[in-house]
Amino acid sequence: MKKSIPRNYRVPMVAHTIRILKALAEADAELSLKDISARAGVGPTSTFRILFTLGSLDYIFKNPTSGTYRLSAKLMELAARSLGSQKLVHLARPFMDQLYARFNETLNLAVFQDGEIIYIEIMESRRAFRMTAEVGSRVPLHSTALGKAIAAFLPEDDLKAKLSQCSWLRLTPHTLMTRAEFQRDLARVQKRGYGLDNEETEIGATCVAAPILDAQNHPVAAISISGPTHRIHAQEKLIVRELKRVAAAVSSAIQAGQKLPPTSA
């Protein structure tokens, strides 16, 4: 039985915003303020304020000639990112299941957005050691095996731009703190085909990651195995071999244009 949520928990302005976005999404042409207000069932003043706010954030486009509104490309991109991440999870999950059954360590799948690594899927180990990352959480590029695995295979111009934005935040005494150190490490990642976080994000935890590449051999994501340092080091060679195998299999599926399951599956 579905538990009802008290009505006083609702934020009316958020509900108004969703109805306005829905009205715009369902329209086959740009809409005037009056039309949006009528279709969404939101008063003209509130509709104007919401549209103004969304427009200032570039999620709504206002036609300077007609004064009508439509959804912006930025909002479409946001939706596409979410859908793309869900599809990637569906594609990678069977391969992650293989690694999980083999090692019983934590599996992570992550993408690179806005200069940070974002976890889109995590399979926690059943053992009594829990990492702090959660799905949706963001971590710095420079301190993680996932970040290194992606950064090492970025086009040179993209990498330079991303490194110029890096905060070089120290998370542990082992975190790489300079661009020169990081680039030397990336050269090693390129050569061996995987990234290594040796207690650079969390003391006591080590992570190994391999990149997932598209048809242009550009990194679209990375997959990693993480756990207590002593356990990962004890099986590091085997973990590296199996992780690279799985990352290559997911990459091949992407490069072949494999049809992905529906996100509702």
Image (cartoon, rainbow, N blue to C red):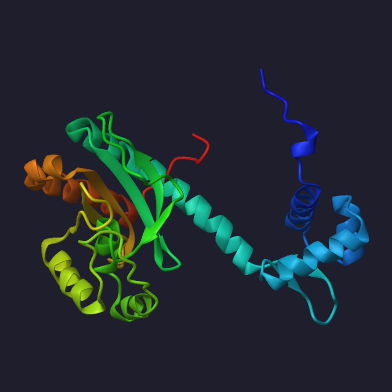
Whole-percent x, y for residue 161 in the image: 37, 80
Place residue 126 in its image quadrant. Answer: top left
State the residue at coordinates (81%, 47%).
12
Using the image as rendered, state which of residue 152 and residue 86 is in the foreground: 152
Q: Quadrant of the N terminus?
A: top right
**In this rendering, would 214 be left or right of 44?**
left
Of 202 and 95, which appears nearest the observer?
202
- Residue 58 coordinates in the image, percent (x, y): 66, 71
Q: Quadrant of residue 179?
A: bottom left
What residue sits 88% from the left and 65% below the top? 33
Up-down relation of residue 232 to residue 197 (above or below): above
- Taking the spot 31% from the left edge, 57% from the top edge, the residue there is 255
Question: Looking at the image, how many numbered discs can be counted on the residues?
Answer: 0
Which of 36/214 is in front? 36
Q: Is residue 85 above or below residue 56?
A: above
Residue 31, percent across and down? 83, 65
Extreme residue toward the top, this view: 1
